[in-house]
Each structure stands twice: as C-alpha cells, then as structure tokens.
Image (spheres, rainbow, N blue to C red):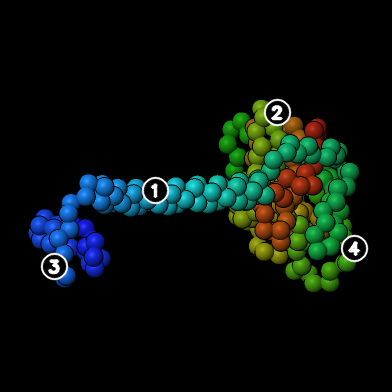
Amino acid sequence: MKIRCEKCNKRFDLDVCSGVCPKCGYYNRIVPNQVDQTIHTKKNRSKRYHIATAVLVIAIVVSWVAAREIATQLNEKGRKERTVEHTVKPEQITIGEPFVYQGDQKYEVQITGAKVDDDKDLIVQDGFEMVAVSYQVTYQNQATDDYFRNEIYMEPYLITKSGEYLQPVSANDIEEGKGYDYDQSSKAGVSETFEYNKGVIYYLVKKDDVKGMWISSFTYDKGEYANSSLRNSYEIKSMEVKRP
C-alpha cells in the first residue's frame, strides 16, 4: 500500500519501506485513517469510472435508437409518397362518350364500338372469340407526320362477366395472324393502346363474356407509377358486342 510521507510528501510503498521515507528518512507511523482514505480514494475513482462508462453506453444506445426511429419515419414517409393510399373510383362513361387525357397536349378519346372479328386467318380456340374494340382520338395540335403516334399512356382492359380484367392481344400477333405488313397494320390502326387517330384493340375472350372496359392512365414524367397509375381512370360498365 502506498502512502505519502508526513514530512516531505513523497509517495512510497509502506510495506516495502516499513514506514521509513526513502527520501528524507522520516518514520511514518501507520495511521488507520490514512489507510482508509487511500482505500476510499481508489473506490471513489473506480466508482466514477464505472458511472462514466455506464453514462457513455446509455448515450450510445439512446443515439442509436433515435437514429433508427428517424430512419423508420423517413422510410414510412417515402412509402406513403409511393403508394396509392386511397380508394380510386373511376369516372363512368359510355360507348361514344369522350374522355380526356392530358399529357404534353390535350387528347379526347372515344370508344366507338365493339364487334366480333370472325376473320378465318385468326386462329381462335373453341369457346373463345376475338373481340375488336374500335376507338377514335382527337387533339388540338394536328400532326403532319404520317408516322406520328399519340403520346397517350393509358392501359385499356376488357372486363368480363366472369370478373376478369383482360389485357389486349399483342399487335404483332394480330399482324401475323392477318398477314399484315407495317403499312397495312398502320392503316387498319392495329394497336394495344390509343396510339392512332382511329384504331382497333383486340381481345381474346370467352364467348358472350364481355361486360365492359376499365381504362387507367399514368404519366411517365411523374416518375411515380404507383401514385399516378390510377389517375384519370374510366369505366364502361356495359358494352354491347356486335356479331357478324
């Protein structure tokens, strides 16, 4: 145990020197209070060290929890911004009634009719039929380029009585089935969306199962497909299909 010399204040090991200061030779008597004070000093230092360590650990844990909570809130905010969080009710329209799509320019679109295409060149399996839905598009700035395509980002689905939402048949499949070249296909307006001024969209559907259409629009420029995919949605609840 180390103590301080009562005369010269030098610290030395009491047990090694038997109480005699190695610097001044003064004999230091063993004082119980001094021993107790030395022990208490060490204990106090140890206690302060443990308290400081505990405070540091708690501060680190609190900072980590706070940072994680902030990150969670930011992620939740981002998720809400990317997610459709409300029920979207489409606007009800009928055959021949125009609806509007606003992109770089304003378009008016009309579904003008639906009929069964009985072209023998189109191979259709038993129990199904090929339904051709015709449309017309008008816009303010008339294009002069024959190869111009309407920039209308809309997805037309055929609704069936059995509750299905059918996507259009590929325009390439229709072209191959009918034997169209590019010019013939363009002239006939074979398409999967509303890209021509007058065109036709084909659906393969069970016989006598057509109910209506769902048309949803989205804007690529927004960069938020989830937020915009159901904007400007339209529904045709009832659609009559003409037969040959």
Please state the horizontal and vertical placement of residue 74, each as a whole percent of the image: 60, 51
Name the residue rendered at 13%, 58% in the picture: 19
Query: Marks 1 and 3, how far apart in space?
Result: 40 Å
**Residue 43 in view:** no
Foreground label between 2 and 1: 1
Tag 2 residue: 161
User: Can you tell which quarter of the image residue 195 is in?
Assistant: bottom right
- Of labels 2 and 1, earlier in sequence is 1
Q: Residues within 10 Å of mark 3 (few under 14, many from 20)?
A: few
Name the residue rendered at 17%, 54% in the picture: 29
What amino acid is at disc 3?
A: Gly
Foreground label between 1 and 3: 3
Q: Residues within 10 Å of mark 1 (few under 14, many from 20)?
A: few
**Residue 26 in view:** yes
Give the SS element for disc 2.
Answer: loop
Q: Are marks 4 and 1 in contact (CB under 8 Å)?
A: no
Which corner quadrant holds the N terminus? Answer: bottom left
Query: Marks 3 and 2, how far apart in space?
Result: 113 Å
What amino acid is at disc 4?
A: Gln
* Residue 25 circle label: 3
- Of labels 2 and 4, earlier in sequence is 4
Query: Marks 4 and 3, how far apart in space?
Result: 112 Å
